[in-house]
Amino acid sequence: TQSTRPQRMLAAVHNNATRGDPRSVVKAIDQFCRQKEWAMNIGDEKGCILDSVVSEVNPAMVLELGTYCGYSTVRIASQLPPHAKIITLEFNPQNAAVARQIIAWAGLGEKIKLIEGSSGDWIPKLKEQFGVDTFDLVFLDHWKDRYLPDTKLMEECGLLRKGSILLADNVICPGTPEYLEYIRNSPRYKSQYFKSHLEYTRVEDGLEKSIFLG
Ligand SMILES: Cc1ncnc2c1ncn2[C@@H]1O[C@H](/C=C/CNC(=O)c2cc(-c3ccc(F)cc3)cc(O)c2O)[C@@H](O)[C@H]1O
Ligand SMILES: [Mg+2]
């Protein structure tokens, strides 16, 4: 039977990355996407911006919306301090299955909690189900029309504290106009745009970093 792109990406990780070495997993996926098949990982160029935000925030608790195959999950988790955790939400079972194996190959299973389900269902349950207080960093990379409703939901559920950082992928391409309009005009956030390129291409894209002011 025909394999899927995520399954071919997983095969590339098994064939080209060293088990237990997260950077080699990231490198193998980037090589696969540049040389074989484009895929919607944040990629190496925007990934460097993600890395710098993670090391600046040095978060104890991270939430990722939209795991896909786990590329950014591995990239973030590989930089977390000891005892820090990332919760990542993914509602497509096939993608979640591939992500679990990529995360396992990287050896980061202890730092990553992958929840199979939709952000809208799970954001309201994170406190009671997982004893979460607030998140220091949230990475938004799921369906682009969910960025705004989920940000409002996180506010309502008390998952953000003064100083929490939201980092949103694809604010130019494919674009998240309603989210940008809200976050850039809300007195409750201070935002900064990091200009870059759509993964593995020369098309403009960028990340929006926003600090929740409480
Ligand atoms: C509410 C909810 N809950 C849980 N999981 C959810 C969820 N909503 C989506 N997911 C999950 O997350 C991933 C989806 C990611 C969506 N990302 C993009 O669409 C995307 C697209 C491009 C792109 C750019 C130019 C093109 F020409 C084509 C594509 C680039 C990107 O970087 C993207 O992120 C996917 O694994 C999906 O199952
Ligand atoms: Mg993206």
Image (tube, rainbow, N blue to C red):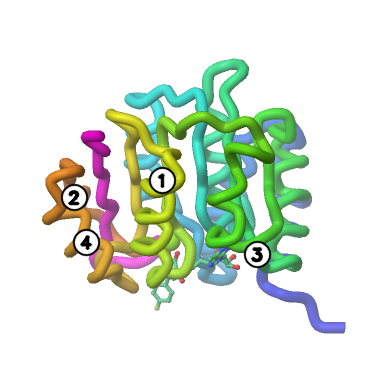
Q: Is mark 3 within 8 Å of ligand 1?
A: yes
Which of the marked residues, 1 or 2, is nearer the chain's N terminus?
1
Determine whether 15 is above or below 131 in the image.
below
The residue range painted magenta reads 199-214
What separation in Å lies between label 3 and label 1 (alpha carbons)?
23 Å
Q: Left or right of 195: which side holds 17?
A: right
Question: Do the residues under discs 2 and 3 have CB atoms within 8 angstroms?
Answer: no
Q: Residue at x 57, y 71 (%)?
A: 37
Disc 3 from disc 4: Cα separation:
24 Å
Determine which residue is flagged by label 2. Answer: 193
Q: Residues within 10 Å of mark 2 (few under 14, many from 20)?
A: some
Q: Residue at x 45, y 34 (%)?
A: 135
Disc nearer the start of the sequence (3/1)? 1
Task: Give the residue furthest to the right.
Answer: 1
Find residue 144 and report its image quarter.
bottom left
x and y percent of residue 104 in the render? Answer: 76, 40
Q: Which label is found at residue 103?
A: none
- Going from N to C along the chain, the mark reached first, 2 or 3, is 3
- The mark nearer the N terminus, 4 or 1, is 1
Gap in angstroms between the C-alphas marked 1 and 2: 15 Å
Name the mark on residue 180.
4
Q: How many marks?
A: 4
Q: Which residue is mark 1?
A: 47
> What amino acid type is highlighted by mark number 1?
Gly
Tell me if residue 104 is in the magenta stretch.
Answer: no
- Mark 3 nearby-residue class (10 Å; few <14, some 14–19, many ≥20): some
